[in-house]
Amino acid sequence: MLVYILRRLLVAIPLVFGVLTLTFFIIRLAPGDPAALFIQPGISPKVADQIREQYGLNDPLFIQYIKWLGSVLQGDFGRSFSRAQQPVFDVIAQALPVTITIALLALVANFIFGIIIGVISAVKQNSYLDRFLTVGALFFYSMPEFWFALMMIIVFALNLQIFPASGLNEVGAESYGPFRFMLDRLWHLVLPVTVLSINGAAGIARYVRGSMLEVIRQDYIRTARAKGLPEKVVIIRHALRNALLPVITLMGGSLPFIFSGALFIEVIFAFPGMGRVTVEAIFARDYPLIIANTFISGTLIIIGNLVADVLYAVVDPRIKL
Amino acid sequence: MNRDAVRGGFKGCCTSIRGIAIISALVTMMFAGCSGKPGSGGASASDSTLVIAMLGDANYLNPVIGASVTSRNVYGLLYPGLLKSEFDTTSGLLNFVALEKKLRGKIEQGSGKKPSGALARTWRVSDDYRSITYILRSDARWDDGTPITSHDFKFAYTLYGNPVIASPRQQFLAELVGADEGEIDFEKAIETPDDTTLVFNFYRQVPEQLALFHTSLAPLPKHVWEKVPPQEFRHSPLNQKPLGAGPYVLRDWQKQQQIVLASNPMSNLPKPGNIPRIMFRIVPDYTVRLAQLQTGAVDVVENIRPEDFKGLENAKAGVEIKPVGLRVYDYVGWSNIDQNAYRHDGTIKPHPLFGSAKVRRALTLAIDRQSILDGYLGEYGVIASTDISPSLKWAYNDAVVPYPYDPAEAIRLLEEEGWKPGPDGIREKDGRKFGFVLFTNAGNERRDFASVIIQQNLREIGIDCQLDVQESNVFFENLRLRKIDAWMAGWSIGLEIDPLDGWGADLEKSRFNFTGYQNPRIDALCELAKAELNPLDARPYWLEYQEILHRDQPTTFLYWIKETQGFNKRIKGEELNILSTFYNIDDWTLSPSASAAE
């Protein structure tokens, strides 16, 4: 298995590189100009040119690529154009903790609620409860996230005034003790995490229900029942364990999401996370930052897939890598 | 082994379910504790903190390179100014004030804004208008105790003018000695005979108004910054902890989240800010900013849309809306020249559709601007006749009355020009249909609203107008590259009238003349006005300028927009004007316990 993992990782290197090269050319050939902010009345026409010179954008595209390649091979992804020329990985390091916190909380909630709902509707297949849960799950699954988030804000922040509408902490939270600070942070995370997890859990519930229904009809479940095991043990020990196999692939696939951020949620709840970094970088034509983000999400997608494959082999002895 | 792994995973899962139960119990307890007191930041923190919601973060808190709106709002509070500027609402002119001198009028003792924040005591313009000498006060200090001297100004100006630093304010140095030859000679252009004397020398005659405007950029502390090489200036760590001297100091800056300023007890420029803490919070989404203004979580939100006023009237936190002067207008741009031909080989010939002034007048007559205002801006918009704002009273031409909505007259003008209705109702001339695409940039509701009405208005007189929305970067690049024939955009004017960039006949030099409009008289009038030493003497030129633009209609000027800012009623003493919403923010006070938290 170790050899397999190593081989996959080696293949990944040229793949990531190809993606970065493609991104490099696509964003540079797209219309728009990183110095566009400085093309406006009252600003000397020289400024945009000086800025482009600083960013090395006056060189021919091919020279730019060679220079870029040289520094990337040394691990230097450059400095952001739009964020005070911070090294791009500093920008990302500031945004990552926020994104990871929200995403991990949301993922845990996703899987827990998704699995519980999925199991219940499979066990009580075609009952009113199942129909209710299925319709409910579809209802939330098809709801646009940003709209749902705004509705939650209007209900809980504006009308009921239970939760805050945005931000990571209350005004003046710096003076709180560590415990109260954490509580304040959690309190600010309730709405966004709820929105994210309701949406995700609905999807997972559908998967679990499907796979559970398949497993329940298997012979070994009948055997377990025939042995006289209590129904609870049959469902949880014998059926669920096998039904969870496809869900594990989903987990691997969720890895990029943990790091890439949830754009709408970050914009609406004013969290300075990765989703906003990426999209603002694109709007500002901040080339180094766009490439660094592509690098991170590309690598994570590859690793996520690998993790899913490995996990699959770990939990299912029938699969050999 | 695998089986164990599964079992282990399973146990973990069960434990985590138990864990969730505990967490949810905790969370419930937490809400029980919080729900009784929304905005549980504690009355003390919110009573002493003014929270301003901003759309985006500052890029730099450094007057030399700060470029975003938030940057300017914040560094204006951190750094001292040589002069204070005022906007004279009766004349519409920018006025400059030093401690002991005012450009126009007398310094009033007693009430009103005192000029005590200015670093200059007084100034004198030489008889030949080629130099200006400032006498600085001697009691001003940077926050580390070092005196602020004339050398700090000279040093800062060398930074403003350094091409490696690429300051967006280089234009302010355009009259200094050497600028006409491409490189400013700072030794000759700025002299510092002693610590409190500062002399700027120009290569040409400069009117006093312009000289004051261009020489009053903020200084930087030389003793801190002189060790930073220019190529490192933009990413120097000093940008993260700016050393200033203004009424506030930077306490905390969490990128893309918030900027916290604290009143500066050391400041005598003019004094420590009244409100102990000011927090600029970055809230990108408009609906959320609005909700937070309603709940009292933030105190100031800029650019409230007119359709939201009603909701704010009933807000729990008392909110008032205050309009500021007319600086922004929307317009529909028509290519006066054939852009394809111009792009191809530089030839200039009239645009097949919009090349004639008569046709452009017909288009303006056909657009029902009042309906657009009634439907969207209401009383917060004024129909525009040209690009000189009614707020600039000294130059505004009252005699130029905007064209009325008159489709019949529009049809008459089009027929005169040979545009006759075709079989499908769309007008034609020489086999060419009067049809075009009107482009605008994405994400502006007001323009979306207006463009639909314009489309319908034009359809009624037999013109086929398709709408297309482009991402802002793409849209402005297409405008610059002259790839668009008709578009709707907005323009925010400076308080110094200088429209040559937008209408100058030299299309290579006039970067913003997207229409390709050329009229030598407009160029001549702008030059004549600029040469006047007293701006009021330039009034006749600007009156004629407006008549010509009104007649030629290079674009259809739609309406001026009164920007409307929302304030929590607990803020007292705010005096916003056309210069800025936060013009006298250091004088604001918060009346305690009037916030939403009951």
Image (cartoon, coloured by chain):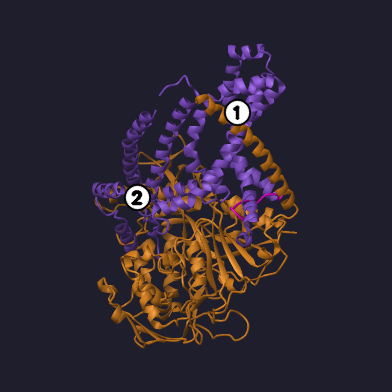
Residues under numbered marks 1 and 2 in contact, where contact means CB atoms less than 8 Å apart: no
Q: Nearer the viewer, residue A210 or B493?
A: A210
The residue that disc 1 covers is A205
Picture quadrant where residue A238 is located: top right
- The residue depicted at 47 percent of the width and 29 percent of the height is A311
Asked if residue B222 is among those painted magenta in the image, a careful observer would answer no
Q: Nearer the viewer, residue B287 or B462?
A: B287
Q: Which residues are magenta?
A: A159-169
Three-letter amino acid code at the position of disc 1: Ala
Magenta span main SS? loop
Q: Colour of chain B?
A: orange
Residue B12 visible in the shown view: yes
Determine whether, in the image, residue B418 is placed left or right of residue B182.
right
In the rendering, which numbered label is found on residue A77? 2
Q: Earlier in the sequence, mark 1 or mark 2?
A: 2
x then y, percent, for residue B120? 46, 83
